[in-house]
Amino acid sequence: MSRLPAAPSQRIDPAKPLSFKFDGKSIQGFEGDTFGSALQAAGVDIFSRSFKYHRPRGLYCMTGSCPNCLVEVDGVPSVRSCNVKACEGAVLKSQNAWPSPKYDVMRALDFFSFLMPVGFYYKTFIRPKLAWPLVEKFIRRAAGLGVLKPVANTGHGAHENDAVHRSIDLAVVGGGPAGIAAALKAADAGKQVLLLEREQHLGGHLKHQVVEMANPLGGQSQAGHVIGKALAEKALAHKGIEVLLGTEAFGLFEGNLLTAGQGKRLWKIRAEQMVVATGRMQQQLVFENSDLPGIMLADALRRLLNTYGVKTWKKAVVVSSQERGPALAEELKSAGIEVAAVLEHPRQSILSAKGFSHVQGVVVADLDADGRAHGPGKSIACDLVVLDAGWDPTAALLGQAGCGWQSKAGSASLWPCDLAPGIHAAGHVSGADGLQEVYGQGAQAAENALQGKPDAWSVRNAGPQSPPDVGLRISPGEDGKKILCLCEDVTEKDVLNAVKEGYDEIELLKRYTTVSMGPCQGKVCSVTASALCSRATGQTVLREGMTTMRPPATPISLGVLGAVKHHPTKYTPLHQANLDAGAKMTDLGEWKRPLHYGDIAAECMAVHEAAGVIDVSSLGKLVVQGKDAGALLDFSYTHRFSDLKIGRVRYGLMCDDSGTILDDGTISRVSDDEYFITTTSGNVAFVEQWLKWWASVKFPCAHVTNVTAAYGAVNVAGPKAREVLKALGAPDLSSEAFPYMATQLAQVAGLECRMMRIGFVGETGWEIHFPAEAAEQLWARLMEAGKPHGLRPFGLEAQRVLRLQKGHVIIGVDTDGMTNPLQVDMKWAVKLEKPDFVGKAALTRSLKEPAPLTLVGFTVDGNKVPGDGGSIVEAGLPIGRVTSARYSPKLGKTIGLAWMPSAKTELGRNLEFRWDDLSVSGKIAERPFYDPEGARLKL
Amino acid sequence: MAIKIPCVHCGLRDVDEFRFGGELRSRPAFEAGKEAWADYNFMRHNTAGIETEWWFHRLGCGQWFKLERDTRSNLFTPAAK
């Protein structure tokens, strides 16, 4: 263990040790450690192996921004161990390494990298053709980031993720000094503020600062971490501020929609105003082997030393600026690290690092004004390299919100500008420096937000700008691997080669080289790649800046994103009654409906010979009222309804203006200016919107109300249906008093019901709509009254057989998005002679120019049933398609509907069906298959 | 899309509550030729700029209304009835 003596800046508790496993080895840490800090303290130096070349990687950023510390934790892959709180008993495993990250045999790939130039998978292994499948297996095994283990599907709603939606006056992203200042300012003004912090404590960079600085709250200078703590306490104590810790904001969308992940919870936050105070991180400095363990950003080292008290190094080389260098060297020395050299960036730099699995020394040199090295450089032995060469803003969220990018004097980075309305940047992210300025910007940003003013701190500078100087980010020297992109192992040479090959635009370059496309999403390398591209293409004026930024800004598990997906389920008011009657339920759209009650054939025969009852509560039900109601229906259905007599029902077919069938149902005239409509089960919302739309366009005095949930409905059909209903006190149901296609409000079982005599299933019957709350009562009475008559409940499957016998189509099953009524033999439902209606022009034309396909009925030889969707073949080629086929117990044969070319639809034509590996024959037959005259309906 | 829509009845609400009804177009007369109908049925302006559109507030007032939207910025102005 290599720990510093206890200090007030530390957040570990040496009195509370804990242990966990890493690749089978026991690791000791303390309460307050992250997995990363405990591993480093235990002497683990190589955390992972890189994506492509299996190079060793160690802690680099300590903020979860880079890919180096990804490990598997308790079966969850790619956990950023540097900022995840360590816990007792956890089991960690290294990724992309075998047998261990320390001794990874795939490291050999690093020495064959000349075989894998940029984009090699686009241009090698193409010939012979057999090569790729063999090579692919190896590449898939060699490259990658952890393995996602399949888990058993536990069904809807069983996962632990949840989602929270919140509307708020001001959302502040980033709980550092700028964010806290903004939150306090707005909350003091009486606003509701949500403050999001990705780490477990507020305070931002102050948390690991031990140098003294002026306190923005007043009083004397104090160590940064003390000020950080004071600010944090103030924010946490404020009633107007809700603080979300451990919450990663990963998406900023238009309309100020902010998405964030907090453990297993997804936050979707709508903020009137937004302050983004996400800070900055040290920019990368690329030289040969700059990705070796032991080379890290200065703030990463500060976190390890000051926050976690970890010190595993003896001798450091520091790259810093003239102003910051001496102070940084002092910090290292006071932690007991010898400082071998402080390089004054950019006058001096590192040319290369030596070492195989850990940095053992660096070659340093003075650079001239053009960034070239004087001489071969000087070797310095060290086991730690601290990079403090400048700053990159942590501006991914601002980038997602469409900000522009600009350069700044004295910086080799790109900074956000031109923020969208309602978004304000403050603090380090907008280029502030020094605590006073950072804090002041935060407070002022909140003030501007409250007053609806535009962002003040990321204003675009006038005039053209030059691209950032890549010479400040990549050291000179042509030799060796200079890796920019830690995630994807993309080197400087790869980028330059890609530019030579013509990928000279940053978006193309990114896609071709995969630079910035790894888990860190370019947090480390994006600016470097952009600046390198600018230099390689000779740009002197900043053009595109950065590649388009998209969510997620930080890796987020799919489970969290999936948390918002709720699947609504609709139950009919007879759901329990169906279950009690032994129904096997099925999903039909959002509805649960009985598929059958155990014996489909018996259910069918009951309808033919006695009586059956089916729950049709899921039918859409609409009421259309007003003096334009009839005109609206005449216009939006193909049939005519304004002449429908009160107390009569008519079949309605709805098309769009291209003549395609949208829906069908029944329309009952209730009174002069009121109609009751049923629609297909899944389609009521669409039909409601469709009717309302035409009403608002053309028929102002027609009002549509969706009453689907208010009514339950059953269809009682069969030769004994009349007796069953009579026993329940229904009125005179004789064909004289209640003819086919009539409707009445009537008392059934003491309830006021709407009865319609219609015949979807082909036997005399009534569809009965009743108040949903009385559904179970009606069902019970019906069963009781039906028992002596042989009444049976029947399900969807029996209904499908019964309607198929009658040749009725089901919209969306037998028809598709191209079907017009003429193709399915329903010209009878289209009144082309009526004035203009939706679809009239298209249907009139299609009368003259028939569609190429026609729906036909068929019978099958033998007892086999072609599968729905099976092919009809002729001379070995598919020419038609089965939409529905069932065995009819009543007819004793298999019947069905199929699409055939219109020229091949003559009755008696032989058909050959193929589905799966089966083949049967049949022929085109006349529809309806059962009771073609419809006599049974009128009994 | 993550925008908020200014429903003429309910005020500014989340886009999830709405159904997009397409751009405002004029329906040809029955007698209009095949081309006019094909154009109406299958073609859209797809303007990069201000477009008048239909929106339906599914999870609110349940009414259709028209809005002008700048398709480049998603900024709305209520359209004349």
Image (spheres, coloured by chain):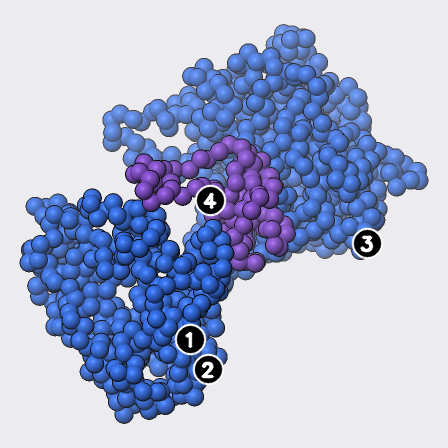
Chain colours: A blue, B purple
Q: Which residue is label 1 attached to?
A: A712
Q: Image check: A928 left or right of A7?
A: left
Dot 4 amino acid type? Gly
Residue mark closest to the camera, 4 vs 1: 4
Q: Nearer the viewer, mark 1 or mark 3?
A: 1
Instruction: Identify the amino acid type marked 3.
Output: Ala
Look at the picture and state if A641 lies above or below A37: below
Left or right: A140, with A340 as reference point: left
Between marks 2 and 3, how big is the CA–CA gap?
54 Å
Residue at the image point whose x is 36% and y is 26% from the top = A122
Is residue A593 visible in the rendered image? The answer is: no
Please give the chain letter of the residue carrying mark 3: A
Q: Are marks 4 and 2 on the same chain?
A: no
Q: Are marks 2 and 3 in contact (CB under 8 Å)?
A: no
Disc 4: which residue: B22
Question: In the image shown, does A747 or A917 lie closer to the viewer?
Answer: A747
Q: Left or right: A640 with respect to A775?
A: left
Same chain under badges 4 and 1? The reply is no
Question: Considering depth in this image, is A447 or B11 the residue closer to the camera?
Answer: B11
Residue A797 location (% of width, % of height): 27, 70
Q: Residue at x 87, y 38 (%)?
A: A215
Question: Which residue was labeled with disc 3?
Answer: A237
- Near-viewer residue (B70 or A302): B70
Gap between marks 4 and 3 measured at Cα = 49 Å
Q: Are marks 2 and 1 in contact (CB under 8 Å)?
A: yes
Disc 4 and disc 1: Cα gap in Å?
A: 34 Å
Q: Residue at x 32, y 50 (%)?
A: A839
Classed neighbour count for the residue bearing mark 1: other residues with Cα under 10 Å, few (<14), some (14–19), many (≥20): many
Disc number lying in front (2 or 3): 2
Q: Quadrant of residue A791?
A: bottom left
